[in-house]
Amino acid sequence: MRLSQYFLPTLKETPAEAQIVSHRLMLRAGLVRQMSAGIYAWLPLGYRVLKKIEQIVREEQDASGAQEVLMPTIQSADLWRQSGRYDAYGPEMLRIVDRHEREMLYGPTNEEMITTIFRDAVKSYRDLPRNLYHIQWKFRDEVRPRFGVMRGREFLMKDNYSFDLDKAGAIHSYNKMFVAYLRTFARMGLKAIPMRADTGPIGGDLSHEFIILADTGESAVFCDKSLVDKDILGRAIDFDGDLQPTVNEWTSLYAATDEMHDQARFEKEVPADRRVAARGIEVGHIFYFGTRYSKPLNAVVAGPTGESIAVEMGSYGVGVSRLMGAIIEASHDAQGIVWPDSVAPFKVGLINLKPDDGAVTGACQTLYAKLSAAGVETLYDDRDQRGGAKFADMDLIGLPWQVIIGPKGVAAGKVEVKNRRTGQREEMAPEALLARFGA
Ligand code: 5CA
C-alpha cells in the first residue's frame, strides 16, 4: 500500500478526551474515530489489526473443535422473556421497537438464541458434544463508556457456547476453552492470567476471567506472583488428551478478581513476598452454568435409555475489539505503538527519504514490488514530506520493521533496516533484506 494514497489520518496533538495511552494512540495513529459515546468507526489501519486479532481468535476456536456460525445482532424480546433475563438485564440492554410494534433488542450476548437454535436441531445424546461460536458486534448501553474501545457500547466479541450431556463433559469443554484462551492471548504477545471470577448476569457457578495486568485496567485483581512470572508465551499446548493438568497448573495458585477475592485465604495461601494486588484488563471470560438456559428454554435431548436430559452448557467470551486497546497498553513506547508481529497491520514500513530523487524512488519501487509480490505486507511511505515527519509517523503506527532508503544508501547499494521494538538498526544490501523477509 502506498501511503500517498492511503486513508491514514494521523494526529500530531494528543486528543484531550483520551485518558489512557491506548486510546490516545488509537486516535493519533488513525486506527479509529468515535462516532457517538462508546461507538467507533474503524479506519483502514485499525480495521486491518481488528481482522488479524479476529483471525487468531478464529484459528484457535477452530483448533479446539468449535464451529463458526453467525447469529444476528437483533433479537426478539420474547426470546429473552423465556429465560427470564429480559427484565433482569436492565438499562444496559438497548431495546428497539419495529414498525409492527414488536419488541426487539440489540444483542448484548447470545445464550438464549444459540440455545433455541441448538434445541430445535439436536434431539439425541448421540449428537453431543457440540460447540458453536460466532464473532459478532454486541451492544451494551454501559453507564460509563470510556477508555476508547476498552469499554465501548458497541463492541466486537467472540462468543461461544458448549453443549454436553453431563457435567463431566461440560467441564471438559470448559477446560478446552481455558486452554484455547491461553493459546489465543499468547499468540498476540499477551500475558493473560486466568482468575476466578464472578458470573454476573450470565449466571452459573464456575468462571474465570483472563486478565492482562495494566495500571489502567478497570478491574482490581489479586494473585500469586508465580502466575505473573509463568511463561505463557510460546508454550505449545494441544487439545488432545487430558487438559485438566494444564488447567490445574493455573488454577491451583491463588488468582481472583475483586468480587471473588478472599483476603484471609490470600494471606494463608500466598507468602507475603508473592502477593500481587494489581489492576487488570479483562480480555476474556468463561462460564460454566449447567442447565441455567437449557431448562427454561427446554433444550433437552434423549439420553441412552430414552430419558429427557437438559443439556449442560457453558459460554465463553473474548473481547475482540477490547484486545486492540489491551495490546497497545501492553506494547508501546514514548514514540507510539509497537505491534507484535502477529497482529501488525503491515509487517514493513518502507520509507522513501527523497521522493524527488529518481535513483532513490527507483530503488524503493523495486523493493516495494518485490516485497509485495512475495506477500510481505508493506506500507510504502512515498509521500512528498520531510524525513522527520515520516519517521515520526512510522514510529507512531508501530509496524515491526522500518526499511529506510535515501541517497547515501542507494549510492552504497544499501538499505537501512530498523527494528521498531528494539530500535536496533542495520545496513544491508536489498537482496539480503529480501532474503530476511523470505522474499
Ligand atoms: N456470554 C458471555 C460469554 S460469551 C459474556 O457475554 N461474557 S462477558 O460479559 O464477560 O463478555 C465477554 C468479553 O467481552 C469480556 O471478557 C470483555 O473482554 C468483552 N467486553 C464486555 N463488555 C465490553 C465492553 N463494554 N466493551 C468492550 N469489550 C467488552
Image (cartoon, helix red, strand yellow):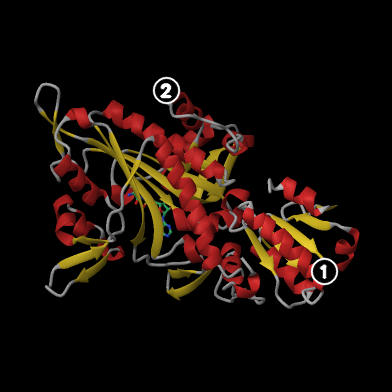
**Element assignment for label 1:** helix
Residue topped by disc 2: 242
**Element assignment for label 2:** loop
Q: Earlier in the sequence, mark 1 or mark 2?
A: 2
Residue topped by disc 1: 359
Q: Residues within 10 Å of mark 2 (few under 14, many from 20)?
A: few
**Residue 139, which numbered label?**
none
Nearer to us in this view, 238 or 274: 238
Image coordinates of residue 104 in percent, x first then y, are 20, 65
Q: Residue at x 57, y 66 (%)?
A: 26
Nearer to us in this view, 256 or 303: 303
The kind of residue on which mark 1 rests is Ala
The kind of residue on which mark 2 rests is Asp
Image coordinates of residue 132 in percent, x first then y, are 31, 43
Nearer to us in this view, 69 or 317: 69
Image coordinates of residue 229 in percent, x first then y, are 62, 36
| Mark 1 residue CB less than 8 A from any atom of ligand 1 | no
Q: Is residue 27 left or right of residue 259?
A: right
